[in-house]
Image (spheres, rainbow, N blue to C red):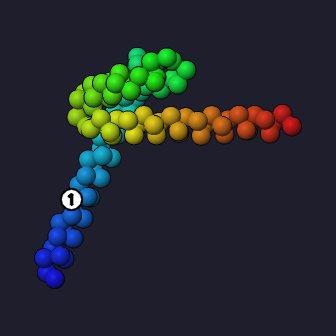
Amino acid sequence: MENKIQFANTSSVHCALQLRQMLRMWARENTSKLIEDSHSLPFLWDVQTAENKNHNKKSDAHDTLAKNYSVSAVEIEKKIWALKKQFHRDYKKLVDSKRSAVL
């Protein structure tokens, strides 16, 4: 029983450290840099480009960005996805507010 408690405490401490690292990693400066870096790679965020369907090219780009930011490629992919979702949420709010102002 003691081993399980000790393991649980160790894993929770480990999770807390990982969370701190992740929060520190995606500070505003790093997020801004990631946006700038991915802006030069439109196939990562623009679904209308023909290259967007090329999963190998996207994977290579995620790997390159991951090396630049010292994180995993999966984390880069999730961050870009989250940024796209946040943009669409904010854009929808803006459009809806303009639409309601006109009415």
Q: In the image, 94: left or right of 41?
A: right
According to the picture, the residue beneath numbered tag 1 turns out to be 14
- Residue 32 seen in render: yes
- Quarter of the image for residue 54 reads top left
Label 1 secondary element: helix
Identified at 46% across, 24% down, the residue is 53
Residue at far left of view: 3
Query: What residue is shown at x 53% (from left), y 39% (from top)?
Result: 86
Residue drawn at point x = 23 percent, y = 55 percent: 17
Q: Position of residue 49 (x, y in %)?
A: 51, 18
Q: Residue at x 30, y 35 (%)?
A: 73
From the viewer's perspective, is 3 left or right of 19?
left
Relative side of 101 to 7, left or right = right
- What's the amino acid at mark 1? His
Establish if 32 lies above or below 93.
above
Task: Indicate the quadrant where residue 32 lies.
Answer: top left
Q: Can you tell which quarter of the image residue 6 is in?
A: bottom left
User: Can you say which quadrant of the picture contains the C terminus?
Assistant: top right
Q: How many marks?
A: 1
Is residue 39 visible in the rendered structure shown here?
Answer: no
Q: Quadrant of the N terminus?
A: bottom left
Q: Is residue 67 above or below residue 20?
A: above
The picture places residue 26, in percent across and down from the top left corner, at: 34, 40
Location of residue 14 in the rendering, given as x and y in whole percent from the top left corner: 21, 59
**Front-most of 54 and 87?**
54
Residue lying furthest bottom: 1
Number of residues whose C-alpha sits closer than 10 Å to that of mark 1, classed few (under 14), some (14–19) or many (20 or more): few
Q: Position of residue 36 (x, y in %)?
A: 40, 22
